C-alpha cells in the first residue's frame, strides 16, 4: 500500500482494517451468546447457559462463555495461527454448512408443499 498510496494512504488503509476488525469482533461477541442462549432454551446446550439475569434479560453466562472462548483463542497462538484457524472455520461454514442449510430448507419447503397439496 505504501507504494501505491504513500505513507499517509497506508495509514488510512490500516485504520480502515482496524475499524473493520473491531466491527467484526463486536458482531461476534453480540450474536454468539444469543445462539448459545437459544440452544440452551431448546435443550440442545447446558441449561445454565439459558438463564437470563437482571432487568435487561441478558444471558450473562452465555456472554461469559463467549468471552472465555475468545480469551482461549486469543492466547492460543500467534496472529497467523489464529487467522488460519478463522479462515478454516469460515471456509467450512461457507462451503459446507451454507449449502447444507439450503438443501434442508428446500427439503422442508417441498415437504410442506406436498402436505398442503394432499
Image (spheres, helix red, strand yellow):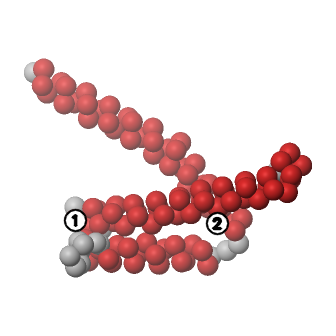
Question: Residue 7 location in percent, x, y?
Answer: 85, 57
Please tell me whether residue 52 is drawn above or below residue 2 in the rendered image.
below
Q: Secondary structure at mark 1?
A: helix
What's the CA distance linking mark 2 and mark 1?
31 Å
Determine the image quadrant of residue 64.
bottom left
Question: Residue 59 location in percent, x, y?
Answer: 29, 72
Rate crowding at label 2 as few (under 14), some (14 to 19) or many (20 or more) other CA atoms within 10 Å: some
Question: Residue 41 location in percent, x, y?
Answer: 22, 65
Which of 89/21 is in front? Answer: 21
Residue 113 shown left or right of residue 58 in the figure: left
Q: Is tag 2's residue or tag 1's residue first in the polypeptide sequence?
A: 1
Q: Secondary structure at mark 2?
A: helix
Label at residue 30: none
Residue 34 in view, yes or no: yes
Could you tell me which residue is drawn at 10 percent across and 21 percent down? 118
Residue 47 in view, yes or no: no
Rate crowding at label 1 as few (under 14), some (14 to 19) or many (20 or more) other CA atoms within 10 Å: some
Could you tell me which residue is drawn at 38 percent across and 73 percent down? 63
**On the image, numbered disc 2 is attached to which residue?**
82
Please tell me whether residue 98 is drawn above or below residue 70 in the rendered image.
above
Whether pointer 2 and pointer 1 mark residues with C-beta atoms closer than 8 Å, the reply is no
Which of 2/110 is in front? Answer: 2
Label at residue 41: 1
Question: Residue 29 location in percent, x, y?
Answer: 45, 66
Could you tell me which residue is drawn at 64 percent across and 61 percent down? 18
Amino acid at each position: 500500500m505504501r507504494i501505491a498510496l504513500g505513507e499517509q494512504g497506508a495509514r488510512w488503509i490500516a485504520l480502515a482494517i482496524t475499524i473493520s476488525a473491531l466491527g467484526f469482533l463486536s458482531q461476534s461477541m453480540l450474536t454468539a451468546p444469543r445462539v448459545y442462549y437459544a440452544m440452551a432454551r431448546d435443550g440442545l446446550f447446558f441449561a445454565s447457559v439459558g438463564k437470563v439475569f437482571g432487568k435487561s434479560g441478558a444471558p450473562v453466562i452465555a456472554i461469559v462463555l463467549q468471552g472465555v472462548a475468545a480469551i482461549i483463542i486469543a492466547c492460543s497462538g500467534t496472529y497467523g495461527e489464529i487467522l488460519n484457524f478463522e479462515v478454516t472455520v469460515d471456509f467450512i461454514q461457507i462451503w459446507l454448512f451454507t449449502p447444507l442449510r439450503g438443501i434442508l430448507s428446500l427439503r422442508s419447503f417441498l415437504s410442506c408443499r406436498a402436505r398442503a397439496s394432499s
